[in-house]
Image (cartoon, rainbow, N blue to C red):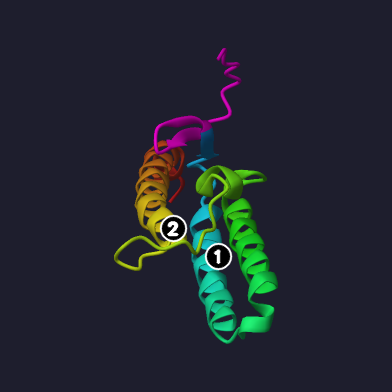
Amino acid sequence: MRNLNIGSGRESFTIDGDESRVISFDPSDFNIVARCDEAIKNVSEFMKDFSDTDADGFSAAIKDINDKICGQVDYIFGEGAGKAAFGGVSPIAADKDGVTLFERFFDAVIPIVQERVTANMEASKARMAKYTQNAK
């Protein structure tokens, strides 16, 4: 696939090595950390509500929570990121240890976001110091 690089600063990552499943973010967008925190809290609330679902509403509740969790990933990374992250599998699908797909996703992506945003913040501070040191 050809690439058009416009220097947006976004960093892109494939999910499980699948070139058709890509998420990206701009490490200079310091608000992404706040969005991650907010999304994790929201997903926790969604899971509490989901756990109260009875058998009659289970099918609708599954669709609802899948949409909500994908929506939170979209909120963090942009439209389509939830679909890329989970590849059409329910985000609440659990592995043999009971760990959900959304937990594995967040456990993998949050450290990367924090590392890249922190590095960008430190680089910004160093650049800004040139201009602010003499302003005291």
Q: Residue at x 61, y 56 (%)?
A: 70
Of labels 1 and 2, earlier in sequence is: 1
Residue at the disc numbered 2 = 101
The answer to if 132 sits in the magenta stretch is no
Say which residue appears at 54% left-offset and 70% top-offset.
43
Considering only vertical position in the picture, is 58 above or below 4? below
Compare residues 12 and 33 and report the one nearer the observer. 12
Viewer-proximal residue, 74 or 87? 87
Quickly name the residue at label 1. Answer: 39
Quadrant (top left, top right, bottom left, bottom right) of the N terminus: top right
- In this rendering, is residue 49 above or below 30? below
Helix, strand, or loop for circle 1? helix
Whether residue 134 sits left or right of residue 76 in the image: it is left
* In this view, 52 is above or below 109: below
Q: Is residue 10 visible?
A: no
Counting from the top left corner in percent of width and height, residue 49 is at 59, 82
Q: Mark 2: which amino acid? A: Leu
Apparent side of residue 101 relative to residue 45 in the rendered image (left or right)? left
Measure the alpha-carbon separation of dots 1 and 2.
15 Å
Residue farthest along the top direction in this orientation: 2
Dominant secondary structure, magenta: loop
> Could you say which is closer to the camera, residue 51 or residue 133?
51
Res. 68 visible in picture: yes
**What is the span of residues highlighted in magenta in the rendered image?**
1-20
59 left or right of 114 in image: right
Q: Residue at x 39, y 43 (%)?
A: 116
Say the numbered circle drawn on residue 135. none
Q: Residue furthest front?
A: 56
Q: Residue 18's x, y, as percent?
A: 45, 32
